Amino acid sequence: MDQRKILITGVSRGLGRAMAEEFIRLGHRVAGCARSPQAVAELSERFPSPHRFDVVDVSNDNQVAGWANLVIRNIGAPDLLLNNAGLINDNASLWNVPPDEFSRVVDVNIKGVYHVIRHFVPAMIERETGVIINFSSGWGRSTSPMVAPYCATKWAIEGMTRALADDLPYGMAAIPLNPGIIHTEMLDSCFGKNAVAYPCAEQWAKKAVPFLLDLGHEDNGDPLTAPA
């Protein structure tokens, strides 16, 4: 398989970290971002050039703009863009979720995806190739108690991504992806001790990364689920 340029948000832990490591293991070039300076420093030391990792808060449009300028100038437009960064609210009924917490979830999970699309996708459109995968959730297609803000954002990702698919030129694809249920810190916050019953991010990535690499323009607009 030819080396591809992979862009991943939220690489400090969980699915983002596992995907970055697996893509690199398979010989692809990864550019990633996270809010944690420590995590970015660790990744940069472990995976030096031609890979790059930067401290970026995707909810900040100016930071994403600067990051996109650096990445596109030094690496080029991504072949595969993975909007993975996300937050979940602390378990609470909707009326008990503090306004600032609700805003943080919306700012990262919806606005962050928009910011990354806004600053990277024009370079992909210029080439008329590339796949954009926006991470949704089972809670973007169903609901559960205590996670209404998170559900709201993931339902929004489903609609926004399918609308984006309608705007793209032939040869490109935008796909909302439900990754499935994986044992991450986010799942710990929701499921507690029951989270350990599910596969870890590294196990998930072994199957998910080849699946992601196989997606193409024929999948444009299709709401998909990663292999279990």
Image (cartoon, grey):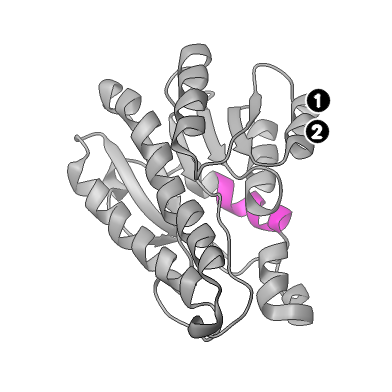
Residue 140 appears in the picture as rendered: yes
Q: In the rendered view, tell whether residue 34 sits above or below residue 100.
A: above
Q: Quadrant of residue 194?
A: bottom right
The residue labelled by disc 1 is 45
Q: In the rendered view, tell whether residue 138 sits above or below residue 126.
A: below
Q: In which quarter of the image is residue 106?
A: bottom left
The residue shown at (73%, 71%) is 188
Highlighted magenta segment, given as a residue range: 201-209
Task: From the viewer's side, name the closer residue of 31 and 87.
Answer: 87
The residue shown at (43%, 38%) is 116
Q: Do the residues labelled 1 and 2 touch (CB within 8 Å)?
A: yes
Residue 56 lies in the magenta-colored region: no
Q: In which quarter of the image is residue 151?
A: bottom left
The residue shown at (41%, 70%) is 152
The residue labelled by disc 2 is 42
Residue 184 appears in the picture as rendered: no
What is the x, y in percent for residue 129? 31, 29
Question: Could you tell me which secondary element the residue under label 1 belongs to?
Answer: helix
Q: In the rendered view, tell whether residue 52 sits above or below residue 213.
A: above
Q: Residues within 10 Å of mark 2 (few under 14, many from 20)?
A: few
Q: In the rendered view, tell whether residue 136 sits above or below residue 172.
A: below
